[in-house]
Image (cartoon, rainbow, N blue to C red):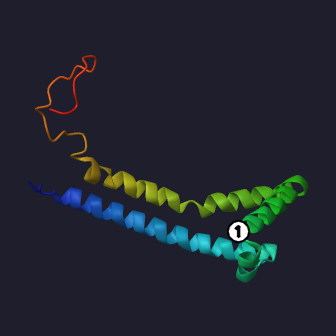
Amino acid sequence: MARRQTHSQMLKSIAGAALIWLGVFVLSWNLAKAAAQLSEYLGITAEGAETLGVVTAVGLAASHALHTYLFDQQEFLRGVYQTLMLCSPLLLIIAGRELLRDEFTDGANEFPNSNAGNVDLTVPRPTVK
């Protein structure tokens, strides 16, 4: 049986979906921008990353991050801050998910069949009748 949504529930659903969409859009834009900056910073082009392989490219990035951590901690902390700001759209996604939580969990705790009764698992019984 379909349930009717109130006006506030409908606005809450629209706001939740909009926040999730905005968060995903901004996060993907930020990640594309960060990937371009990282490849430029490391001097690796897209073709070079394909040639070297993902593992090698990640290894070079980790090596560069370790070098920066050991010899220029202020630059390393700036990179950590930029990474945290890059992931800030996740807060929009989490807020949208919280607004939509009731939409997807209303009937989740209800059992469709209530005639199961009590079951004693200590008594052996055949599985086929």
Q: Is 126 positioned to the left or the right of 16 in the image?
A: left
Q: Residue furthest top?
A: 122
Q: Residue furthest right?
A: 71
State which quadrant residue 37 falls in. bottom right
Question: The residue under label 1 is which amino acid type?
Answer: Val
Q: Is mark 1 on a helix, strand or loop?
A: helix
Which residue is depicted at the point 24% across and 39% down? 109
Residue 64 at what x, y percent from top left? 83, 63
127 or 48: which is nearer to us?
Answer: 127
- For residue 19, above or below residue 40: above
Residue 19 at what x, y percent from top left? 40, 64
56 or 23: which is nearer to us?
Answer: 56
50 or 97: which is nearer to us?
Answer: 50
Residue 46 at what x, y percent from top left? 70, 80
Quadrant containing the N terminus is: bottom left
> Which residue has dot 1 on it?
54
Which residue is depicted at the point 34% across and 54% down? 99
Quadrant containing the C terminus is: top left
State which quadrant residue 114 falls in. top left
Which residue is depicted at the point 27% across and 21% down? 121
Q: Is 61 positioned to the left or the right of 114 in the image?
A: right
Q: Is 59 positioned to the left or the right of 98 in the image?
A: right
24 or 55: which is nearer to us?
Answer: 55
Crowding at dot 1, Cα within 10 Å, few <14 / some 14-19 / many 20+, comes out as few
Count of number-bearing discs: 1
- For residue 6, above or below residue 46: above
State which quadrant residue 55 falls in. bottom right
Residue 69 at what x, y percent from top left? 84, 54
Which residue is depicted at the point 77% across and 55% down? 77
Q: Is 49 positioned to the left or the right of 118 in the image?
A: right
